[in-house]
Image: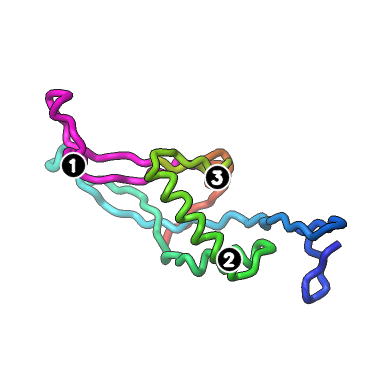
Amino acid sequence: MVSNRAGEVLPGYREWPCCTWRFITIKKQQIMSILYSKIQRVNPRNPQADRKWYLVPNRVEQKTEKEIAEALSKNTTLSRGEAALVVDELQAVIQNALLDGYSVQMGDWGSFQLTFNCTGTDTEAECTADKITSVNIRFRPGKQMKEALSKATFVAR
């Protein structure tokens, strides 16, 4: 049994005769309500048509890498410094894998892959890399993420 400075037992740690192993454990978080607003939009295919109302999610603020690392340290057995290193290294590893042509599967969390926007051509010979107008990262949520989102409630802002 391993305990922290306050004497609390750390469930993510296991003691073996040779050393202490640490397994990262994440606390379950309650799903919060998603804030939304109503906006009117024009139909891009028919600009003359009446505008329609749509619901759009509100982004309260943006979380920084440092804030994500701090949340990880509170919800796991990692220190702030270790969590910051994990977040930083995870970013680099995902980025390098994508640039090397891999898609990145993060378990039930979801997967990342690259997509292109490009200009269409009439012939295969004309279809070259200079037709690429932008490179995008696409995230596809996995089972765990979809289940969490399906339990969300919605609140008008």
55 part of magenta stretch: no
Disc 2 designates what residue?
71
Whole-number angstrom distance, CA of label 1 to CA of label 2? 41 Å
Q: Residue furthest bottom?
A: 6
Whole-number angstrom distance, CA of label 2 to CA of label 3? 17 Å
At x 78%, y 75%, the residue is 5
- Which residues, given as a range, are shown in magenta? 114-141
122 part of magenta stretch: yes
Q: Left or right: where does residue 105 sit relative to residue 48?
A: right
At x 86%, y 62%, the residue is 1
Whole-number angstrom distance, CA of label 3 to CA of label 1? 34 Å
Secondary element at tag 1 = loop
Disc 3 designates what residue?
109
Q: Quadrant of the C terminus?
A: bottom left
Q: Residue furthest front?
A: 18
**Local crowd at mark 2 within 10 Å, few (<14), some, or many (≥20)?**
some
Disc 1 designates what residue?
44
Residue 151 locus on image (x, y percent):
57, 46
Secondary element at tag 3 = loop
Residue 152 locus on image (x, y percent):
54, 50
**Local crowd at mark 3 within 10 Å, few (<14), some, or many (≥20)?**
some
Residue 93 sits above or below residue 63 on the image: above
